[in-house]
Amino acid sequence: MRAPDGDRAERLGDLVRAEWTKFRTITAWVVTAALVAVVTVALSLAAPPARPACAPTGGCPVVPIGPDGGPVVATFYFVHRTLAGDGTVTARVLSLSGVVPTTRSLMRGQASGNLSAELAGARPDLQPWAKAGLLVTAGLRPGAPYAAVLVTGRHGVRFQYDYAHDLAGPAVPANAGAKPRARWLRLRRTGDTVVAFASSDGTHWTRVGSARLTGLGAVVQVGLFVASPPSVRLGLNLGFAVNSSVTPTVATAAFSHVSTGGRTSATWRGDPVGANAGYPALPGRFAVRHGRFTVSGSGDIAPQVAGVVGVGHTVTRALGGTLAGVALAIVLSAAVAASEYRRGLVAATFACSPRRGRALIAKMLVIGLVAFAAGTVGGAVSLAVGVRFFEAHGILVDPAPLAADVRVVVGTGLLMALAAAGTGALSLTLRGGSGALVAGFALLILPGAAVGALPAPLGEWLLRISPAAAFAIQKVAPRYPQVAGLYTPANGYDPLGPWAGLAVLAGYTAVALVWAHIALGRRDA
Amino acid sequence: MRAEWTKLATLPGATAMVLAAAALTVALGAAAAGALAHTPAAQDPVRLSLAGLDLGQALVAIVAVRVAAGEWETGMAAVTYQATPARHAVLAAKAAVLAGATAAAALAAVVASLVAGHVALVHAGVPGEALTVTPAVARAALGTVIYAALVALLALGVGAVVADRVWALAVTLALLYLFPLAAQMVTGPRWQRLLRQVGPMPAGTAVEATTHLAALPVAPWPGLAILGAWSGGALLAGWIATVRRDA
C-alpha cells in the first residue's frame, strides 16, 4: 500500500515532522525528556564532594596557584639561604631513601612531637617520584616561581620549574654501582634565568636544562629541598565502593659538599613550605654534622591532580548527575522505540513510508535531538549552578577555560543523543524495549560504576572498549607525566581523550543503526 | 498453575534468557576471581566467584517483568482473568512458577560459578584461597539461590504494578542498582552505610560474603530478609494493582 503522493510521504523532513508529532503528543514522554535534564542537575547538586578538612587551629586549606594560573601542590621541606643577585648553589646527593608510615595517626597525617621515634616502625619504600635536590625560588610562598634540579626515586635526574615543566637529566651511567642516585647537582642563577647542571664526579658537568622565570626578583632563596608524594592505594571492593587510602610518606636525603656562590646570607634555615595546604604530608626536618646535611621532607612540588589526592576538584565533578540523566534517556528512548511494536503501530508507520531506512533515520533523529537538548540544558545548568554552589560551600573547584566548559556541555548533549539513538535503534531491531534497555544499561552505566572497584589495568581496558568511554568528553584536567601514577579510572581519569571516547560511543551507535536498518528492511514489520 | 508454567516455558526467548543469565553469572564470576590475582590480598574468593550475579540479575528481571506485564500489553490478560477470576491465584501461580524456575537455574549457576572461580584461582596461582565446602560457603551458595528467586519476585511485583515492560524493567533496575551507585557518590559515611543497609541489592548480596563479615553493612541472613521485605512489598503492591485493574 502506498500513500497517494508516494514521493512526498518519503521526504525526510516530513518523516521527521511526523515522528516529532508522535513524540510530543504523549505527555509522559515529553515529561520524561524534561526530567532527563532535571535529574542531571538535581543529582549533580545533591552529592557534592566532601569539604576539605580545616585544621584544628582554624586554618582552612588554600590551594596555591602557580605562575601559569593553574592549581599546584607546593608542600616540601626547604633548607635555604637568601641570595641577592646572581649566584650558584652546588651539592652532592649521597643517598635518597623513603618510608611509608604504618601507624594509624601518621597515616592520617597527624604527627606528635617525636617524629623520628614514631617513624621507627615505618615500612621502607621509596616513592618513584620522591624528590631531593637543589631549589631556587622567589620566596617561601607556595606557588612562587622556582627552578629545581633533583634526583628522584625512580626517574633519575630531572630539571623542573614552575610546576608544570619537567625535563629528564642525563641517564644513570652504567658504572653507578650501588649508589645510582648519587649525583652532583648545581644551579646557576643569572638574572631571571636559571641553568641546571649535573655531574657524576664533581668535575665534568653536563647541562641539564635552563629556564627563564618571570617574577623571580632580585632576592631569592636557594638551597636543598626534599619532598615525597603520598602513597595511594585504590582497593577492590565489589560492593560498588571505592576504597582509597592515601598515606603521606617521608623521604630522607643526605647531601655533602654543599656550597653557594654570590652574596648569600650566612646561616642555613630549615623551613617547611606549604604545611597548611591540606596536602597529605608529615613534618620535615634537617640536621648538619661535619658538613653533611641530612634532610627529611614530605609532600610534592608539582601541578595539582584532582582526585583522591589533592584538595581541589575539576568542573567535571559538578556534573555528577550525568550518569542518572543518561540512564533515564536510555529508558525513554527504549520505551519510545518499543511503543510502535507494542500496539502494532509499526505496520502503519511502514505503510506510510515504505522506505524503512528513512523512517528509521527520522525516528532516531527525533529521539537524538530531544536527548541532545535535554543533555545540553542539563549539562549547562549543572555546570553553571554546580560550580557556584560548590564554591559557596567551601569546596575548591579548579577553574577551567571557557573552551573546555563549552566542550563539556556540548559533549554531554552529544553523549545523551548517541546513547538514546543507539538504544532506540536496538529497540527497533529487537522489537522490544527490554533487551535494548539492559544492553544500554550494561554498556553505558555499569562500566562507569564498576570501574571504581576494578584494578587499574582492567578498569582502563573496560573504559577503552565500552561505550562508557564517552564520559571522557566531560573530563577537563590536563595530564602531567610527573604525576603519572594518579591518572587511573578509579581516580576519575579516562584512558582515552575526550573526543576519542565519544567516538567509541559513536561507533557503537553506528553499528546499532546499521543493524536496525538491515533488520527492518529484511523482515515483515 | 500448570497453565502458568506452560506460559513461562513457551515465552519466546525465556529459556535462552535464563540460560544466558546463568552463563553470564558463571563467566563474570570466573573473571572476577581471576582478577583477584592482580589485587592486594584479603579479598573474598566466594563473593568474587558469585559476583557475576550482579549483572545476571538484570536478565532475571527481564524474564520476570515479561511474565508479569507481558499479558497486559498484548491483551492476553482479559483471557487469563476470564478463565481464572480469582486474580490473586493467578499472581500466586506466576510467582511460584517464576521463583521455582529461577531457583533451579540459580542453583546450577551458583555451583558452576564456585567451581569456575576455584579453577580460576588455582590457575592464577593464588595460594591458600582454594574453595572448600565449609558452612560459610554452603550458606553463601544457598543464600545466593534464594537471592536470585527474591530478585525475580521483586521484578514480578514491579511488573504487576507498572503494566509496561520497559518501564517496569527500568524501575526494577533502578531499585537494584541505584542504591549502591548512590552510596558511591554520597560523601557522608552515615548515608553510605544507610544506603547499603536498606538497598535490596547491597543487603541481599551480603549473604554471598564469607570473609570480613564484621565489615559488612548488614549481616548475611538479615540482609536477605531485607531483600525479602522489598520483594514482599512489591508483590503486595502488584497484587493490589492486579486486582483493581480493568483487564
Image: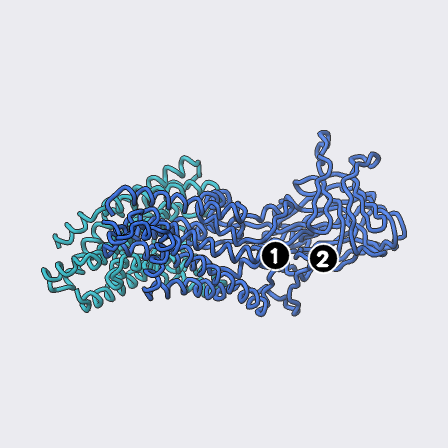
In the picture, measured across the screen, residue A105 lies left or right of residue A4, that is right
Q: Where is residue B135 in the image (x, y as percent from the top left)?
A: 31, 49
Whether residue B208 sits left or right of residue B94 in the image: it is: right
**Which secondary structure, mark 1?**
loop
Q: Is mark 2 on a helix, strand or loop?
A: loop
x and y percentages locating residue A234 in the rendered image: 52, 50
Write down the residue under mark 1: A310
Of discs 1 and 2, which sits in the foreground? 2
Residue B206 visible at all: no
Q: In this view, does A519 lie to the left or right of A312?
A: left
Which of the two residues, A411 or A300, is positioned nearer the viewer here? A411
Residue type at mark 2: give it.
Answer: Gly
Furthest residue in direction left, as rendered: B83
Please name the color used to draw chain B.
cyan
Q: What residue type is labelled 1?
A: Gly
Q: Which chain's residue wears label 1?
A: A
Quarter of the C terminus of chain B within the rendering? bottom left
Verify CB contact (< 8 Å) between mark 1 and mark 2: no
* Residue B121 pos. (x, y %): 40, 39
Residue lying at 39% horizontally and 46% vertically, measured from the top left:
B48
- Alpha carbon of mark 1 to alpha carbon of mark 2: how far? 15 Å
* Residue projecting furthest to the top: A175
Question: Toward the viewer: A355 or B35?
Answer: A355
Q: Provide the letter of the chain coloured blue.
A: A
Identify the chain of the residue marked 2, using the numbered disc in the image. Answer: A
Q: Which residue lies furthest to the front in this view?
A: A5
Tag shown at residue B203: none
- Mark 1 on the same chain as mark 2: yes
Q: Residues within 10 Å of mark 1 (few under 14, many from 20)?
A: some
Mark 2 — residue?
Answer: A143
